[in-house]
Amino acid sequence: MKIIIDQDKCVASGQCVTAAVDVFDQRDEDGIVVLLNDNPPEDLAADVHQAAAVCPALAIVVED
Amino acid sequence: MSVLVVGASAAGLSTVESLRRKGYREPITVLGAEWHLPYDRPPLSKQFLCGDWDEDRTRLRPDTMLSALEAEFVLGDSAVGLDVERRTVHTASGRELQADAVVIATGLRARVLPDQGGLDGVHVLRTLDDAAALRKDLLEASRVVVVGDGVLGAEIAATARKMGLSVTMAGPQAAPLQSQFGPVVAGLLEELHASEGVHLKLGTAVTGLTDEDGRVTGVRLETGEVLPADVVVVALGAVPATDWLADSGLRLDNGVVCDARCRAAEGIYAAGDVARWQHEDSLLRLENRTNATEQAACVAANILGDAQPYRPVPYFWTDQFATKIQVHGRPSEAAEVTVAEGNLDERRFVVHYRRDRRVVAVLGWNMPKQTRLHRHHLVHA
Ligand SMILES: Cc1cc2nc3c(=O)[nH]c(=O)nc-3n(C[C@H](O)[C@H](O)[C@H](O)COP(=O)(O)OP(=O)(O)OC[C@H]3O[C@@H](n4cnc5c(N)ncnc54)[C@H](O)[C@@H]3O)c2cc1C
């Protein structure tokens, strides 16, 4: 699994962190997404796909 | 089994994606009135309008992801009627589309002023074509008047200002978004716009437009004053796009009325801006981007046999100038506002909105991450 984030599209909603807290975080100063792990273990796959699905800015792409 | 989704935008596409993610492999048809492949609306008043993003960047999903969905997209054709019993949709071009489940995701249509029809230089902003036409006009204009002091009006004013135009925002409220955010936060928004050079004509109603040779020349206020303009943007909100359902027999009342599981009738569901569903003890309709996705996911689950009530914690954001505002829950003008983190003077804070001592919303100003961390006050409230 490979995760690609687009910080320029990110709107700082933090929905991805709510969905997958071990994989995504937000910058303290402006809330923009940061990737904690761009190749997380398989057992987080469902959460990561959920994060990509709920991102209101479509800023997360997951390649299996 | 087969599914027909009417409306090829945020809620419509999310329905399809959720169905496929949940393992549904049978036919899906998506009917969309616009010719464009599904695109996102929030950038239309922001990055697309100011020219930072091109049309391609507003696409909801690239071609590869769309084709992987294996759904049939019927674009450039509008639904004009629904036979609820037979779950059949009739389209403007004469198609008849039948399915076992129909999802209504037709969103909203912008409200217009009674006398705006046919005048050059007058715009609304709901679609990509609207945004492209407005942008083209703004590039040649020097003075724009935005009629409307809600979230869309405020965003357009900010973007037009960023593009270097002289901008006036006119509306009936004491401050922008006051009925949603209350006087404290709306007051700060007013200061923000004023400090960025937006002329505010608030607390007065707009009564009409002035024109010459078929082109708008200004906006008339109830005081008799005329605000001169090369371009006028009418941002007076939007109404549910349910005209096509008028004869369907479905209950239409400020949206498609649904039960707690977003069902309007047996086999008929609604999601996104158009849906007004039974939420706790009242009917609720939300107009925001995350609701489109979340409600669509709930509808997809229910089509596949779940019996999930839809119970979101509403969320929306707005970006104006360099200010990012995030809102979880449902703020209101009457709620009591207290600062929970940061401070107002530094324009970096989180406030709580309380009614009957319960936190009903948290709003963050330039503190997105911290605001999210206050969301639990709503979940347990
Ligand atoms: C300019 C703008 C900026 C915004 N900014 C923000 C923001 O910053 N934050 C936020 O949270 N939300 C924002 N929103 C709101 C957000 O975009 C909407 O909540 C979201 O688009 C709703 O999605 P939807 O699919 O329900 O409806 P829509 O996006 O309105 O899609 C409905 C689709 O149905 C189609 N349709 C309509 N009638 C028919 C018919 N009869 N037959 C076939 N197709 C039909 C339409 O062409 C349209 O493509 C913004 C909206 C706009 C317009």
Image (cartoon, coloured by chain):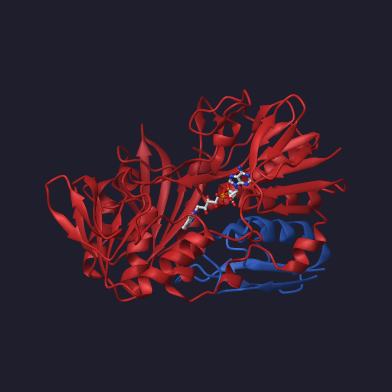
Question: Which chain is blue in the rendering?
Answer: A
* Quarter of image, res B35: bottom right
Between B144 and B94, which is closer to the camera in this rendering?
B94
Q: Position of residue B160 (x, y in %)?
A: 34, 69
Left or right of B203 in this view: A22:
right
Q: Is residue B254 visible?
A: yes
Q: Residue at x 41, y 55 (%)?
A: B124
Q: Which chain is red?
A: B
> In terms of depth relative to the viewer, which is nearer, B99 or B306?
B99
Counting every numbered tag in the picture gives 0
Of residue B242 and residue A5, the one placed in the foreground of this image is: B242
Q: Which residue is situated farthest in the front direction here? A: B213
Q: Is residue B190 left or right of residue B110?
A: left
Indicate the position of residue B209 as horizontal and vertical percent values.
25, 52
The residue at the point 42 percent across, 73 percent down is B50
**Is any part of residue B348 visible from this angle?**
no
Image x and y of residue A14, in percent: 56, 60
Could you say where residue B30 lies in the image, as x and y percent from the top left?
Answer: 73, 49
Residue appearing at x 33%, y 46% in the figure: B113
Residue at the spot x=19%, y=47% of the render?
B203
Q: Which quadrant: the N terminus of chain B?
A: top right
Q: Quadrant of residue A19?
A: bottom right
